[in-house]
């Protein structure tokens, strides 16, 4: 299963999330162009459990070197596929969590999830001299936060079948539940000394994200973060909106939703609506009048389904991004 995107757009531009992705990509580029001993670099800035669990080895490093490794390991990656996989999941799930927490709280949340994942790996692999690198634990924390924050979301997922791309919408609890179950199964049946994948770091990060989110939401958002939120507010939603025409009862009427930015709701806008209802798939233009409020229902006469010579109406509920 390859996730493509989720169905809940963020109301702000995810500046910190994109910055984290950019830093990870930049560090990987520096790794690939490093002229020295790359293995030595990984041993120095990766997370090596025996550096913390064995006093004789720990004594060979300064406090600063030990502290830096607890941060630097989550920005190093072993291959381009390792990097792409982590950054793609962060791209899909991170914007919504940044949107909910605000930029500054999100940055600290991300780093704390990474640290907890690192400690989880060290505690479950005390005798390991193999370095662990990658953003997987921190990204797992973002996914854990997403699970409890957006459990009604759906993940548009690509499932290749005999070279034919097949897209389905999977409820986020199912998608993320399968992912974390795979981590537990892999952790239980893999040899930590040879697998090269820090399964318990993933699990620790995921659990940390679920717990830390609650704590961060109790901390008031700073004035600087509110300024950033206001300046990164999305001014528009996508031109084309795809909605499934829900049916209630046996009539010919169908129902759907559209999500607008606050400025679009205030000023009015034109959108294209693509309705999927059974085997029918129709696209038409909709004019949203100025001053439209959240939960307003627009009646589009004659745009419902055809049933026994009768054509129903399409009732469109307008949702609005939260004001920032």
Image (spheres, rainbow, N blue to C red):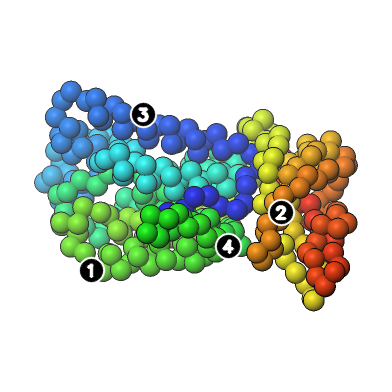
In this view of the protein, can residue 152 be seen by the observer? yes
Which residue is disc 1 drawn over?
189
Mark 3 and mark 1: Cα distance apart in space: 34 Å
* Residue 280 in the image, given as x and y percentages of width and height: 69, 61
Q: Earlier in the sequence, mark 3 or mark 1?
A: 3
Left or right position of 87 against 54: right
* Residue 232 in the image, given as x and y percentages of width and height: 64, 33
In this view of the protein, can residue 53 be seen by the observer? no
Task: Name the residue nearer the viewer: 1 or 188.
Answer: 1
Report helix, strand or loop for mark 1.
Answer: helix
Q: Which mark is residue 79?
A: none
**Residue positioned 67% across, 41% down in the render:** 238
Report helix, strand or loop for mark 2.
Answer: strand
Residue that lies at the very extreme toward the front in this rendered image? 309
* Residue 265 in the image, given as x and y percentages of width and height: 81, 42
Q: Earlier in the sequence, mark 3 or mark 2?
A: 3
């Amino acid at each position: 299963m390859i996730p493509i995107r989720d169905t809940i757009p963020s109301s702000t531009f995810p500046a910190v999330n994109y910055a984290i992705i950019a830093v990870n990509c930049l560090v990987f580029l520096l790794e690939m162009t490093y002229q020295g001993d790359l293995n030595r670099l990984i041993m120095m800035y990766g997370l090596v459990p025996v550096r913390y669990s064995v006093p004789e080895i720990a004594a060979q490093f300064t406090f600063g070197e030990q502290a830096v490794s607890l941060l630097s390991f989550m920005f190093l990656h072993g291959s381009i596929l390792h990097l792409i996989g982590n950054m793609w999941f962060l791209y899909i799930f991170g914007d919504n969590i940044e949107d909910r927490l605000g930029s500054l709280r999100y940055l600290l949340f991300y780093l704390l999830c990474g640290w907890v994942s690192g400690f989880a790996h060290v505690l479950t692999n005390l005798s390991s001299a193999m370095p662990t690198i990658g953003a997987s634990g921190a990204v797992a924390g973002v996914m854990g936060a997403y699970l409890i924050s957006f459990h009604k979301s759906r993940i548009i997922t690509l499932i290749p079948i005999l070279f034919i791309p097949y897209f389905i919408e999977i409820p986020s609890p199912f998608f993320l539940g399968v992912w974390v179950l795979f981590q537990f199964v892999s952790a239980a049946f893999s040899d930590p000394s040879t697998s090269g994948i820090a399964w318990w770091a993933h699990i620790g990060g995921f659990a940390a994200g679920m717990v830390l989110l609650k704590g961060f939401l109790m901390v008031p958002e700073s004035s600087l973060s509110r300024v950033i939120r206001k300046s990164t507010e999305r001014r528009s939603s996508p031109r084309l909106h795809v909605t499934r025409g829900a049916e209630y009862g046996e009539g010919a009427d169908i129902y759907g939703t559209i999500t607008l930015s606050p400025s679009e709701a205030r000023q009015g806008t034109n959108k294209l609506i693509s309705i999927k209802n059974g085997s029918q798939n129709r696209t038409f233009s909709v004019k949203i009048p100025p001053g439209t409020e959240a939960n307003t229902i627009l009646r589009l006469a004659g745009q419902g389904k055809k049933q026994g010579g009768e054509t129903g109406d399409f009732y469109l509920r307008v949702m609005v991004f939260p004001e920032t």
